[in-house]
Amino acid sequence: MMKEDNRNLLLAIVLSVVVLLGWQFFYGVPQMEKQKQAAQQTQQAQSQQAPAASGTAPAPATPGQPAGSAAPGAAAGQGFGTRDQALAASPRVRIDTRRIAGSISLTGARIDDVSLKAFRETVDPNSPIIVLLSPAGGPNAYYSDFGWVAAPGSNVAVPNAATVWTADNQTLTPAKPVTLSWDNGQGLTFKRVVSVDDNAMFTVRNEVENKGAAAVTLFPYGQIVRHGRPQTLGYYVLHEGLVGYVGEQHGLQEWTYDKLDKEPALSPGTVGRVWKDAVGGWVGITDKYWAATAIPDQQRKFEGRFSSFQNGNDRTFQADFLAEAVAVAPGATATSQSKLFAGAKEVAAINGYERDLQILRFDLLIDWGWFYFFTKPLFFLLDWIYKHVGNFGVAILIVTVLLKGLFFPLANKSYASMAKMKALQPEMTAIRERHADDKMKQQQALMELYKTQKINPIAGCWPVLLQIPVFFALYKILFITIEMRHAPFFGWIHDLAAPDPTNIFNLFGALPFTPPTMLHLGAWPIIMGITMFIQMKMNPEPPDPVQKMMFTWMPVFFTFLLGSFPAGLVIYWSWNNLLSVTQQGFIMKKNGVKIELFDNLKGMFGKKPADATAAAAPKPANTNKK
């Protein structure tokens, strides 16, 4: 029975390794190439301003209106060859803050030009800064729009994409808001007051004054529009696409671009999903590290919508909200206030906005995953240590030591049980020889031995099993949090969130060629493989040749598997292995058990240890007598 269980366990390990390796080489590696190509294309588009397709810019849908129509708020501008040409096509108000550079278009009053001063494309300090939002008509158009929608059937003129606004000053700063004004010629005067904080949050206050003789009904809206299907990494652990928290009743909504395109039609040419009667929340579009979200008044009901439509060769995606109606009596003024987040998904900033602005579940803009209850605390611990030591790599090493201390009692018990198993090897060998022809009696005798000596034969699995949740939580943190992006360690590691840049196949840069991605194997993955190999060779060689082969080759499998994983994760695994070897060696010595490392290494090269025969023979002094 025990042998059968061991075989099942080994089969599960083999299948797991095969799946992981298959995923890495047939999915993970192509995705790395895709990510690399996307980064190169983005950098080329921003530095060289490659021409975009000419023609008319697709028209997004104003909430409550058919997509692509000439509805209020729609874009209908001429296509431009470069981003600079699209920016120059409209008079603008400059945005200048500590972390943002950009502008607001006075044609349409859109916030459609945002670059992030604190972040660059690569670790090179001279590489271009990140461009987040861009105007319609240019390449990679991506912008926000806020305003009013007239009641169905109404002839009230409201501002749209062609409206030219008047600004009271030419620069928006955290200390000085900008007020935009427009008169519709029908008795309604519209004002849009835009302010910005020191980081990435804009406040948009829309006002309408009714100087006419009749009351009007208007609906506040906000939307994030993105033209073209952006390059995505396609990893299961990361959400990229449309995202929002649409009230407690609808909760978190995460829709990839492909998933949204499969939704039912909302109107001719438009597909998507609508959530009604929500109170509190936000809607937007997210990349791995950056996001733009439209945030309605958290106390008023709104309708949230994700939509997609085709216009020529361009696919446009939109996340928007439509708030409940506002009646504006003659002589009265109505106000609607919304917010726009356009920036990096920094944990402290996102949590601060959720807390200070009372934005419902804004923390979920960061994709912590299903195990956020473990992932988030682990990040906060890493971040707290980082603030004291100044290096995220060192913080990872310290957290690993702390986790080892936390799990020490269980690991200590496991290693002690393994040591006892080692001491009982002669008796176990004698039982197998004595009942060689009766497997049932052999298993019963072994189980009785384990019971008498109070040994759990699978206790040695616990140290490995305990690593699994920590491994995946740390992998998630390294993969999704911008704090880890471009975070250096020591030596050649300049980005803990990226794979080790060295490669053994070109002698770590000594040879002038770049090996294929599937042969990417850096110095740290090799160090990890060596520490894993040493850890496994600390124990006696399994008597089953299949087990022996598995445990011999497993470090090689994992070395190649982790070759393209984030360097921070590989450093964690290497350091954890080294601590485990030290801990296991101490416990084995404490229990008077021989450490098999050197004998196992000799055995690999065909040199049988001198005491192997004696060690294999049963020792009468240790024989259990009932």
Image (cartoon, helix red, strand yellow):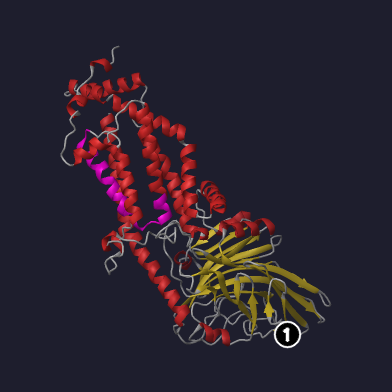
Where residue 77 sits in the image (x, y, percent)?
Answer: 56, 86
| The one of 551 and 87 positioned closer to us in this rendering | 551
For this view, does 461 lie left or right of residue 51?
A: left
Which residue is at a point 50% across and 70% down the rendered structure image? 120
- The part of the chain drawn in magenta is 543-571
Where residue 69 sits in the image (x, y, percent)?
Answer: 57, 80
Tell me the quarter of the image containing the N terminus: top left
Task: Classify mark 1: helix, strand or loop.
Answer: loop
Is 480 included in the stretch rendered in magenta? no
Residue 489, picture quadrant? bottom left
On screen, residue 342 above or below 624: below
Residue 449, picture quadrant? top left
Q: Is residue 351 visible?
A: yes
Q: Is residue 316 visible?
A: no
On screen, residue 605 above or below 613: below
* Residue that badge 1 annotates: 184
Where residue 108 sits in the image (x, y, percent)?
Answer: 63, 81
For this view, does 55 lie left or right of residue 219?
A: left
Q: Main secondary structure of the magenta part?
A: helix
Q: Residues within 10 Å of mark 1 (few under 14, many from 20)?
A: few
Where residue 612 sits in the image (x, y, percent)?
Answer: 19, 29
Residue 13, picture quadrant? top left
**Mark 1: amino acid:** Asn
On screen, residue 546 above or below 51: above
Is 551 included in the stretch rendered in magenta? yes
| The one of 416 and 527 positioned closer to us in this rendering | 527
Disc tally is 1
